[in-house]
Amino acid sequence: MKITEIVQTALITATIIILGMIPPLPLGFIPVPIVMQNLGIMLAAVILGPKKGTLAIFGFLLLALIGFPVLSGGQAGPAFFVGPTGGYLLGWLLTPLMIGYGLSRPFINRRWSRLSIIWFAGVLLVDVIGSVWLWLVSPISLIGSLVLNLAFIPADTLKAVAVYLVAERMRIWNKETTRL
């Protein structure tokens, strides 16, 4: 990797950590709070691409695993990878790969299709993996877990739209700078 790619990857990892400083919003009826870090996960995917985005998230998750308080609310440690949040963290690791794959398809050239890819991979995929994991590690049924996760959809959809808008602006900006 070039030095600029290393710096970009580190900056996105730092952005995800900074988003973790925003306090999580506990819902009370599900043991997983609403967090802002998934915004950074989706940003990593659209800004860095599948390989570097996954590397940035892997580095972030490694820091959390070894005890650095980088998860939302200053949380960290192996317990978060085997507890109710473990599936969401796994989903985060897969998000850049799925967004990158989806956006690389030649038929993905319309705005709604690009937004749909970001939403499906950054919101739906993560919530489904998180739901299945939650079902496996808690007394909540699979259907109950899937239904409870519907509470995340509105806020996560807004985050996906914000990421899409950033990505579109960057895409337009990149086209403008290449003409110079």
Image: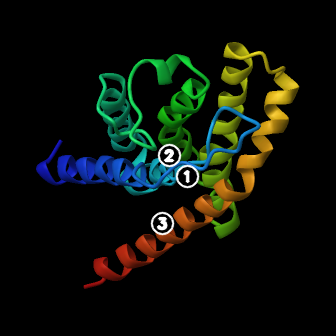
**Percent x, y of residue 166:** 48, 69
Q: Is there CB contact under 8 Å for labels 2 and 3?
A: no
Which label sits on residue 167?
3
Direction from residue 109 to residue 140 in the image, left or right: right
**Percent x, y of residue 67:** 31, 26
In the rendered view, tell whether residue 99 sits above or below residue 68: below
For image coordinates 67% across by 58% down, the residue present is: 155
For image coordinates 46% across by 75% down, the residue present is: 169
For image coordinates 52% across by 33% down, the residue present is: 94
* Label 1 secondary element: helix
Is 60 in front, or is 44? 60
Which label sits on residue 103?
1
Q: Is there CB contact under 8 Å for labels 2 and 1?
A: yes
Q: Quadrant of residue 8?
A: bottom left
In the rendered view, tell whether residue 50 sits above or below residue 18: above
The N terminus sits in image quarter:
top left
Say which of marks 2 and 3 sits in front.
Answer: 3
The CA distance from mark 3 to mark 1 is: 11 Å
**Percent x, y of residue 33:** 61, 42
Label 2, on which residue? 100
Q: Amino acid at mark 1?
A: Leu
The CA distance from mark 2 to mark 1 is: 5 Å
